[in-house]
Image (cartoon, grey):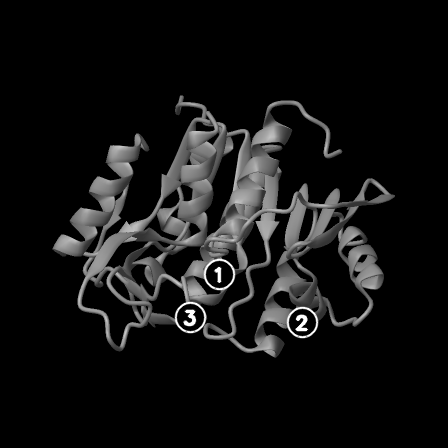
Amino acid sequence: MAKSYDLFTFGETLALFMTVDTDSVITAKNYSMTAAGTEANVAVAAHQLGLDVYFQTKLGPDELGDAVQNGFTAIGLKTDHFIRCENYTGALVRNHGGSQPFVNSYLRRSSAGSTFSPADIDDEVLANSKWLHVTGISVSISDTSKAAVIHALEVARKNKVGISFDLNFRKKLWSEEEASSALNAIIKDLDVVSGGVDEYEIIFGSKDPEVNLKTVAALGVKTVIMTAGPEEMRILHDDRRFNYSPQKVKIIDPVGSGDAFISGTISGLIGGLSIE
């Protein structure tokens, strides 16, 4: 029997190059390098919160892929099941955002991570895990990756694995119409759906946040979480509606904040906490 994990997640991982000496990619000469990817962020954060995490990604046969994989190994995540394929390791280049707006440049078309398919999902490991986390990004990057998400959801439902889905709409990856059509067909019978108020409007169609909350709940979603940056988040849980005000903090870098939030939510639920 496969080892039992707390959290199973998978998705594209990019090598992240961030400016160091200036706050603009145009003028920078020096960069730091780490890894980026919404599922990767959730996996690392959940691992740091004490969960036993199985994270699956695909990397190229290149040194960039080696560097990314070594980074996860150094953190303590299991990486010997990472898939290395012929496609290149994707990359993200961005400024650090200290004095200028954040500008992201993606190098990811036909990347290794975009080649995910149902065959890349370890069904036995997933079936023995407590929780599955997937996102709209994995649905958007390719048809085969979308099929992998659908397959993983089917395996999780069949084996009564908890499921969370982060909407994660990215306009550089697909249109609003494409996202709405695809995600409305996929999102059903889930434990948690999370996303920003604007993402709900794009995908579920109403300018009224309350209508969108009820629409998603009617799809068989137990807990619907709608964030709004520093403003109150809306939560609809088992027909109970309440708000939560996030603590005020100094914003250093908002990138990945949603991933940190959902990893904390997953960790709490797996640990037996109520959604309140």
Left or right placement of residue 187 versus residue 126 in this view:
right
Q: Circle 1 is placed at which residue position?
A: 137
Q: Secondary structure at mark 3?
A: loop
In the foreground, 89 or 158:
89
Query: Which mark lies nearer to you, 3 or 2?
Result: 3
The reply to whether residue 80 is visible in this rendering is no
Q: Earlier in the sequence, mark 3 or mark 2?
A: 3
Residue lying at 84% horizontally and 62% vertically, measured from the top left? 211
Crowding at dot 2, Cα within 10 Å, few <14 / some 14-19 / many 20+, comes out as some
Q: Secondary structure at mark 1?
A: helix
Q: Position of residue 58 (x, y in %)?
A: 29, 52
Crowding at dot 1, Cα within 10 Å, few <14 / some 14-19 / many 20+, comes out as many
User: Which quadrant of the rendered structure holds the N terminus?
Assistant: top left
Quadrant of res 131: top right
Q: Circle 3 is placed at which residue position?
A: 100
Q: Amino acid at mark 3?
A: Gln
Residue lying at 72% horizontally and 34% vertically, measured from the top left? 275
Q: Amino acid at mark 2?
A: Ile
Left or right placement of residue 144 versus residue 245 in this view:
left
User: Which quadrant of the rendered structure holds the C terminus?
Assistant: top right
In this view, 225 is above or below 186: above
Q: Position of residue 153 (x, y in %)?
A: 56, 47
In this view, 166 is above or below 269: below
